[in-house]
Amino acid sequence: MPDDVARQVPPPPVALLAELTHRCPLSCPYCSNPVEMVPRGSEMNTADWARVFDEAAALGVLQLHLSGGEPAARRDLEDLVAAARGAGLYVNLITSGLGLTEARLDALEAAGLDHVQLSLQGVRPEVSDRIGGVAGAFDRKMALARSVVARGLPLTLNAVMHRHNLDDLPATIMLAEALGARRIEVACVQFHGWAAINRAGLMPTRAQTEAAKATVAAARARLKGRLVIDFVPPDYHADFPKSCMGGWGSTGLNVAPDGTVLPCHAAQSIPGMTFPNVREVPLALAWAHSPAFNAFRGTDWMPEPCRSCDRRSIDQGGCRCQALAILGDAAAPDPVCRRTPGRAQLDRLLAGLPGPEAAPAPLTPRAAVR
Ligand code: SF4
Ligand code: FES
């Protein structure tokens, strides 16, 4: 990157994803956390996180997403919410719902929690509990969802969809409606972290994908003004890539449980890249001037055909981590793009996955970490 670009101060990020812990009671086969997780002993403490929240607010961050793993695995979650609210951040809790008792919800509400985003592994208890690996988890999630809505807290359902549950999409949307959720994110699995191990079992068929698009379009028309439906289709079946993170180092950043500051949740898969740690470097410095954040910022890094493409400001060349995973080169255009030579490699990979007539490959669950 040229010196003059590196010296420029980029606009501030809008959102910070705080991965409070990698510990989680579930064992979802599509977990996007890295294969090598941060152990409990290396997690930042309450004071470290509170300082990060203050620095984030000073930098210009507006929204804080408390994530994991399962954030409720942290006994200081209520203190962290209070600290974030004290810093002036809008606080969203992304949770499996397990570990959140009514008493803890009371305390979180009192601490100023603004929003709850609840993960959904399926709409049928047997599917949900099988995918998440915890018997009875579905009923606990439903109880939590009802409690959140009864408290007047806005609820988003985060439905991760794949070959085993995408046919249940109409029922999934109906469940969000029945629970009184304000929003549902229908996100088809992205193959990062542990999820990549299960690609053959999780990848939806093209027919499932087309049916899902039609379902979402009809539901959006029917529920306009009542339920917002975000939809992330499986991009392997698309012609153009998605804009990952709204562009590298552009609108958001992640902080891992040990304080590593990341441009996206899978960035540590990129070999040879050194990431700043907020225990050693101020967040503002990490954002604006670290080589990792500047590596793929803007358009100067782009190879052809992205560099001269009319879509480069729409998708920013797609996902760096997907380019690495499929092509072995994080600086290549996302292979989803049909304008790039890398697409042939993705098509070969797709052709090798179980077709619509074949049974999907068995799933390897991630071991629950406590
Ligand atoms: Fe996006 Fe690059 Fe493809 Fe253009 S060539 S659509 S910028 S990935
Ligand atoms: Fe890293 Fe897309 S997940 S750039």
Image (tube, rainbow, N blue to C red):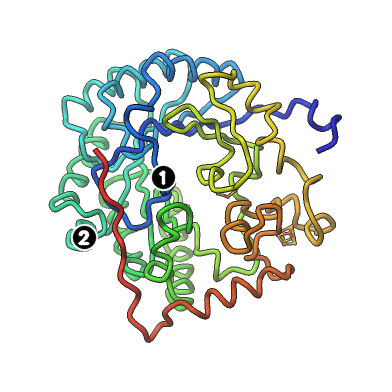
Numbered marks: total: 2
Which of 151/74 is in front? 74
Residue at the spot x=21%, y=23% of the render? 106
Expressed as whole percent of the image width and height from the top left, the position of residue 271 reads 60, 47
Residue at the spot x=28%, y=23% of the render? 109
The amino acid sitting under disc 1 is Glu
Image check: 216 left or right of 291?
left
The amino acid sitting under disc 2 is Arg
Q: Is mark 1 within 8 Å of ligand 2?
A: no
Residue at the spot x=29%, y=58% of the render? 365
Location of mark 2 (residue): 130
Residue at the spot x=45%, y=63% of the render? 216
Q: Secondary structure at mark 1?
A: loop
Image check: 137 left or right of 314?
left
Query: As drawn, which residue projects farthest toward the left?
Result: 136
Q: Is 305 above or below relative to 289?
A: below
Expressed as whole percent of the image width and height from the top left, the position of residue 10 reads 73, 29
- Which badge, 1 or 2, is on the more N-terminal residue? 1
Image check: 3 left or right of 348?
right
Which of 367/319 is in front? 367
Quadrant location of residue 264?
A: top right
Expressed as whole percent of the image width and height from the top left, the position of residue 269 reads 54, 48
Q: Secondary structure at mark 2?
A: helix
Location of mark 1 (residue): 36
Other-residue count near label 2 (Cα within 10 Å), few / some / many at <14 / 14–19 / ≥20: some
